[in-house]
Amino acid sequence: MSDEAVDLGRRIDRLTARKAITRHEADRLTELAISQIPQECQIGVVHRDYCAENLLVSDAGDFYIVDNEAIRIGAFDFDLARTWYRWPMSPTERAVYWESYGEHRDLSSFSSSFLFWAIDVMVRSALYRLQGGTVWAAVPIRKLRILLRRAQTPVPPDSYLRW
């Protein structure tokens, strides 16, 4: 099993230890994640907080990315899943985003491992928020439960991308 999967399993166990999710939910999340574990990952420089409020546009129309303290070397697909989770877009905006992103990098690895990365992102968010004791800690837990409900019925993998 890859290091990413082992780390995700540990994070899911931490959610269970904090009583944020049940053991049954943890087992199902782990099973879902493993079902789409990436065979290989493209690695590079990732922002880890790419979203609308971290983009500035100059009067000349140039884009600048700010809030760069989380930049590091990591999996492109994790960064893309983090953007999917963090940046709410309308269906039209999301379609434009995917199309534009796809002009620079093939999205097939992301699509085929989407559940792995989405679960990883939401589990990390839940742990971060629980640790900080924020009122928003329930949001990623609720989204994980929605994902578990949706996973009970076979759906096309790209339907998760439209969530």
Image: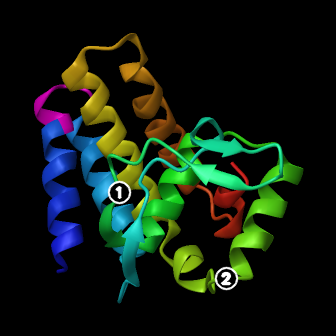
* Applied colour scheme: rainbow
Count every numbered label the image shows and give the total: 2
Find residue 8 and report its horizontal and vertical position in percent. Answer: 23, 58
Residue, x 45% and y 72% (percent of image)? 76
Name the residue carrying label 2.
104
Amino acid type at circle 1 is Ile
Above or below: residue 53 compared with residue 31: above
Q: Secondary structure at mark 1?
A: loop
Nearer-the-camera pick, 67 or 19: 67
Q: Is residue 118 left or right of residue 72?
A: right
Residue range in magenta is 15-20
Nearer-the-camera pick, 30 or 52: 52
Task: Spot the residue most to the front.
Answer: 60
Residue, x 30% and y 44% (percent of image)? 124
What crowding class fits label 1: few (fewer than 14 Cα within 10 Å), some (14-19), or many (20 or more)?
few
Mark 1–mark 2 Cα distance, whole angstroms, equals 19 Å
Mark closest to the chain's N terminus, 1 or 2: 1
Find residue 106 and report its horizontal and vertical position in percent. Answer: 63, 86
Question: Mark 1 or 2, which is nearer the eye?
Answer: 1
Nearer-the-camera pick, 53 or 156: 53
Amino acid type at circle 2 is His
Name the residue carrying label 1.
71
Residue, x 41% and y 53% (percent of image)? 48
Q: Is residue 18 magenta?
A: yes
Quadrant of the image containing the N terminus:
bottom left
